[in-house]
Amino acid sequence: MTADSRTTTDSRTTFDPATHPFWHGFAPMGFVLGQAGPDDMWVRGEGSWLVDAQGNRCLDARSGIGNMNLGYSREDIAQAMYQQARELPFVCTMRWEQAVPVAVDYARALVDAAPAGITRVRFTHTGSAAVESAVLMARGYQRNVGRRKKRTVVALDGSFHGSTLTAMATGGQRILHRFFGPMPEGFAHVPLPAMASCPRCRDGASTAEATCGSGVLAALRELGPDQLAAVFVEPVKGVSGVPLPDHFLRELREFCTAHGILLVFDEVFTGFGRTGAMFAAELSGVTPDVMCFAKAITAGYAALGAVAVTDEVYGAFDISSTSAFSHASSTDAHPVACAAALAALRAYQEEDVVAQGRAMGVRLAHALSEALSGSPRLGAVRQLGAYVGLDLLDDEGRPAGMPMKRHLEARCRRAGVLIDYTPDTVMLIPPLTTPPQDVGFLAATLAEVVLAFRESDVDESTLRPATLRGHR
């Protein structure tokens, strides 16, 4: 698709808030229903594009929200789901029933694709459920191996690990804790690695006595290693696309191993090619004890999450009836979702999609750097695999605020491009399979909107309201 394939018809119809039955998340429904109507609903996806009821097309540079790594209209995935739904659409695996073959086949394929040492997988239905399951699994593991005092779960300040209560408590988003609290007990948060002042991060000095992780490890020691069940990290921060330093992850791995603490990598966002490797754990060469997956696990075609573990973790359960991991949902390992995931994994592997994503990311970053060269708005263009972060500046040379980003998002949407943004950056995460002509259209459109921006143009009354996390 190209820009010429889009129409310019504007909808004149909005939904009636008094009768509209659907309540979706984050934004106030009164605003949503007052801005759009039946003609604005997405009705079709084609490759990297979404199409509304009027035929208007938007290039989806946010992949849904990091889910659609293979793009829309994949016939192979749709056919796999259809065939499984016809053969056997549902089996409950939370009690004594055997799993369907497709769940076993996908579990085998997933652990074969995972980093060495990850050998077992348990399925959930969302990323938040995967994180919650990992929290309970970590505590159950410590209890089963005789370390009953090790109950506290630790994550980094500002981290996001999901939207259920346990997943929110795991994450370090204080605003969510205040709004939805009180949070459950047994969670703690430690400072982020001090990368800006770390000699090893700055110039690669390998003899530095203190590294960016020193403060993190000191905070873990202060909490008491004999109390800690698990440490959760995103190996690459989803809100910024910044990877945690390799040396920090290695130090954290050594600390956790020495003190019997499980190291958990939350790869709900980073898994399946987004960061330039199948899994972000591969970037550092550090293998965790537990990995959490979702989003692109099915390339967005069905709801599925997973918790993958080492043999050591797996072996601590099912020793007796009291040691079993007695936690599940009736929709875990849903056969149709597992069929979608297996078809998606085959596509990732057989079509060399991860390499496609890396090339796409390089192409997009280069095009944006050229188009915005010399602009006082440009702070930096950062690229990691198929993640491109565009750091923008306001009139005073400070990092762009949220009103500016919401304004740019609205302008881009009117110009036929869907972008995402966080407090850290403008986040560009198109499908890994986005072709060069679409990358060119994305870069040209976004650059045109940025270059035309004037702070006096921002009218917050016309923009989508901010959310609790400040973005989307």
Image (spheres, helix red, strand yellow):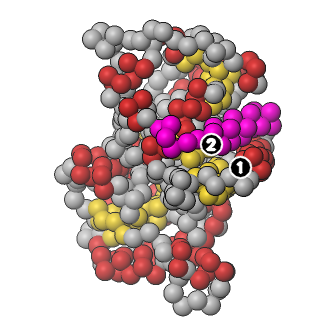
| Label located before the other in sequence (1 or 2) | 1
Give how far across and how far down residue 248 sits, in percent: 54, 74
Amino acid marked by disc 2: Val
Magenta-tinted stretch? 435-458
Q: Quadrant of the C terminus?
A: top left
Q: Which residue is mark 2?
A: 450
Left/right placement of residue 275 relative to residue 32 reads: right
Query: Which of 17/96 is in front?
Result: 17
SS of the residue under disc 1: loop
Q: Main secondary structure of the magenta part?
A: helix
Q: Which residue is mark 1?
A: 372
Q: Position of residue 456 (x, y in %)?
A: 49, 41
Q: Position of residue 55 (x, y in %)?
A: 63, 12
Where on the picture, by quarter, is residue 14? top left
Cβ atoms at labels 1 and 2 below 8 Å apart: yes
Q: Which mark is residue 336?
A: none
